[in-house]
Image: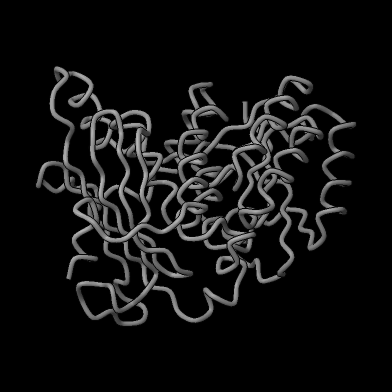
Amino acid sequence: MSKNFAITGVGGYIAPRHLRAIRDTDNRLVAAVDTKDSVGVLDQYNFDVRFFTEVERFDRHLEKLRRGAESERVHYLTVCSPNYLHDAHCRLGLRVGADVICEKPLVINPWNLEPLQELEAETGHRIWTVLQLRVHPKLVELREKLLAEKPGKPHDVELTYITSRGHWYDVSWKGDPSKSGGIPTNIGIHFFDLLVWLFGGVTDTRVHLSDSRRMAGFIGLERANVRWFLSVEQKDLPFVPEPGKKTTFRSITVDGHEIEFSEGFTDLHTVVYREILAGRGHGIEAARGAVELAHKLRTAEVSSVDDKAHRKLKG
């Protein structure tokens, strides 16, 4: 049976992937909210969506639907709002009797995870996280290969992610660490989740570079030593970007071999939705490792560059 969805942050960058996933899983969007009203994208999916620019009125509408017929109530709330609002909007969803599908990061600070788990227990509803790299076919295949290996020397891993952002980034909420979680949370959390998922728990961390637009360091994992570099600086790209064309460089190597997963990103949200709707999604605990790691890196003291630093810092 088709489910009813509502969405927060519908005017944002990532929302269209969720709108497509709702449509492509044969479900219906019935309500949306965003503080900005440039949301004509809604007409590409459904003309009959109630739209709000105030979350209080959105909340009131969902509560009204909850008290009405089962066929009209909201079954899932999708959260695409700015990072610092994720946990508040997750609580809103649970309180109106919906399960929640929340974009990354589930929370900025790890101590906000337990209250969400308590509210799950109180309401009987679930919070599902969007960890789309865990459903990428090539990465699933790699994980199965790694888990089948006999214990041995840790793998040597290098993560490089550079995604050029203009001056708007610093002025927006994304440039405010209290709202975005900074570079490791806003830019790196999917990759940190991937690394923990592939190579096990964290044993060591170092930060060699940290400013508002770039971070780099070392992570020791159970089965890997990881040198990582994250940046939104155009000058860090290995090519000259042009507006409207390619502006991102993404690379993960394991023992010198590139993991090729550039293709297949477009439909991963739809795969995530299918898994969630089938009861096989990732919940709060699945998000914990990356949330804790990103917070630890964000609050760490910067160490001098050493032999564990990423090659981009070694000149």
Q: Nearer the viewer, residue 76 or 300?
A: 300
Q: Nearer the viewer, residue 9 or 220?
A: 220
Is 218 situated left or right of 113 in this image?
Answer: left
The residue shown at (31%, 59%) is: 229
Report which quarter residue 88 is drawn in: top right
Q: How far from the left and from the top, in percent, is residue 209?
A: 37, 63
The residue shown at (59%, 48%) is: 108
* Position of 179 relative to 192 (above/below): below
Q: Nearer the viewer, residue 305 or 227?
A: 305
Is 149 situated left or right of 66 in this image?
Answer: left
* Position of 276 relative to 178 (above/below): above
Q: Nearer the viewer, residue 18 or 28?
A: 18
Number of numbered callouts drawn? 0
Q: How far from the left and from the top, in percent, is residue 307?
A: 19, 53
Q: How far from the left and from the top, in percent, is residue 159?
A: 26, 52
Q: How far from the left and from the top, in percent, is residue 8?
A: 68, 52
Location of the C terminus (image quadrant):
bottom left
The residue shown at (37%, 44%) is: 205
| Colouring | one colour
The residue shown at (89%, 46%) is: 60
Residue extending farthest to the left is 256
Is 158 situated left or right of 214 in this image?
Answer: left
Location of the N terminus (image quadrant):
top right
* Position of 51 relative to 253 (above/below): below
